[in-house]
Amino acid sequence: MGPEGSGWARRKVRAVVLCPQSPRSPPAFAHAPILRGPDSGRVSRPSWARWFPGHPGLHFPAGLPLGWKALLAKSEVISFPVVQLHLNRTAMRASQKDFENAMNQVKLLKKDPGNEVKLKLYSLYKQATEGPCNMPKPGVFDLINKAKWDAWNALGSLPKETARQNYVDLVSSLSSSLESSSQVEPGTDRKSTGYETLMVTSEDGITKIMLNRPTKKNALNVEMYHEIMHALKAASKDDSAITVLTGNGDYYSSGNDLTNFTDIPPGGVEEKAKNGAVLLREFVGCFIDFPKPLIASGQCPALGHLPSPSLGYSIAVYASDRATFHTPFSHLGQSPEGCSSYTFPKIMSPAKATEMLVFGKKLTAGEACAQGLVTEVFPDSTFQKEVWTRLKAFAKLPPNAMRISKEIIRNREKEKLHAVNAEECSVLQGRWLSDECMNAVVNFLSRKSKL
Ligand SMILES: CCCCCCCCCCC/C=C/C(=O)SCCNC(=O)CCNC(=O)[C@H](O)C(C)(C)COP(=O)(O)OP(=O)(O)OC[C@H]1O[C@@H](n2cnc3c(N)ncnc32)[C@H](O)[C@@H]1OP(=O)(O)O
């Protein structure tokens, strides 16, 4: 670790955790660790329902060191304006029995619905049982309790009956969406509903993986990393001929979700960085190994690191003339990833790659096309029509021939790409512990800077 690593790396941080409560007890502040697998950044829990029934207790242990306190305090990691579920079914009124059933149903969910939803459930439970928020506002460093307070307080004077109905509706939609995720079989020609952060459809021989966090500019949170990997693995086995990666909303992606840096596991920032490197290596590895033609179709700006893997390994990149490509690694105190340190200088030229990867120069779609990063640029007004006409024609070509052709083009490089990926992740692991990186993240989270 370099000298500047001292700012973050030596500080130990204990966990910010969600804890089990009895559905009928008032929210308490018990202690239950978030468990992390040894080789993954993903939170794993023996059974999430065990520690999150109808209203979660949330625990924020004392003793956080000052630097991380400042970071966490400035972040809005636990804020949750975006629960994209329809909650306002006013025509029906849920009975007390429905409400109790819903509380029991929550305990049976097999998949963790994520903090945003859990806080929504908590706030609806409190509103339904106690009415408008009646707790004193917690202090700024008391992040978890503040998140809970914010959630409950945000419901204002919502009537108890409506809160009860919304709770029942939310649980019902969770039960169907989370249960169905385990039932989705790769290879089916239909919309897959089991993803939280993606929309995946398979039609006309094309599997379309659409990043679907438009309100966050499609920033990649940990769940999205996992879901993209899952979707790619499923697409590699399904009966589609080609796979298209695209984004919903006005950004193809805004890169790594910077709040990923704020949820610190019991092992502290070093463990966080280690898990992040494992996750990133696995994520990029999925792109390297993806066997079918992969097309990135971007009508809007692409920021950060999704451009690297998808530009580096896609057979084709189609962009509208409104799209831009930006890899601001240095701005964020980070370093190239997604094999861009190897693929970009080969595709472009070392000098142009330096401008992009070291100085963070943003390229227009036209410039990226001239540099060979983008296959073709289409006018924004006709982008969808022209690209999809072309994709549908490609999808009718013999799939095995396409797969074998891709294999022969890419296979010689595969080993090298995996080695580059490993090296980049190891370097990044060190960068994530640096003051340069911490300052950039803090600046963004405290809304002092945008790219
Ligand atoms: C130890 C860590 C483990 C991590 C796990 C693995 C990580 C692998 C990482 C590999 C290296 C990757 C590098 C990168 O991706 S570098 C790029 C990072 N991205 C950014 O820096 C972009 C930051 N965003 C912005 O600058 C602007 O939001 C943007 C220019 C994209 C859009 O500006 P605009 O004004 O149009 O919109 P808003 O800023 O209001 O954004 C709307 C909401 O979206 C949230 N948002 C946007 N981007 C991100 C992001 N990258 N991370 C988190 N949140 C993001 C933004 O905060 C707004 O939210 P609110 O409405 O709630 O305020």
Image: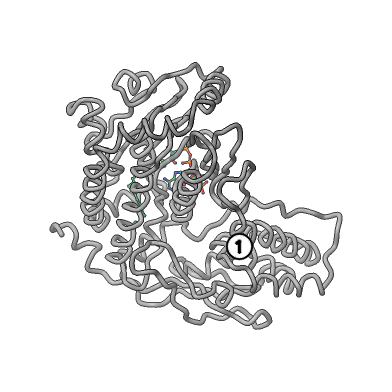
Q: Secondary structure at mark 1?
A: helix
Q: Quadrant of the C terminus?
A: top left
Dot 1: few (<14), some (14–19), or many (≥20) neighbours within 10 Å? many
Residue for point 49% across, 46% down: 237
Residue at the spot x=62%, y=57% of the render? Answer: 183
Residue found at x 33% / y 38%:
308
Give coordinates of residue 50: x percent, y percent: 57, 77
Q: Quadrant of ligand 1?
A: top left
Looking at the image, residue 236 lies above or below residue 281: above
Q: Amino acid at mark 1?
A: Ala
**Residue nearest the observer in this picture, 429 or 334:** 429
Quadrant housing residue 13: bottom left
Residue 272 picture location, percent across and down: 33, 63
In percent of width and height, residue 40 lies at: 37, 63
Q: Which residue is disc 1 drawn over?
A: 151
Under 8 Å from ligand 1: the CB of mark 1? no
The colour scheme applied to this rendered structure is one colour
Q: Is residue 182 left or right of residue 162?
A: left
Q: Quadrant of residue 26?
A: bottom right
Residue 75 x/y as whole percent: 43, 57
In-front residue for pair 10/449: 10
Above or below, 386 relative to 62: above
How many marks overall? 1
Q: Quadrant of the N terminus?
A: bottom left
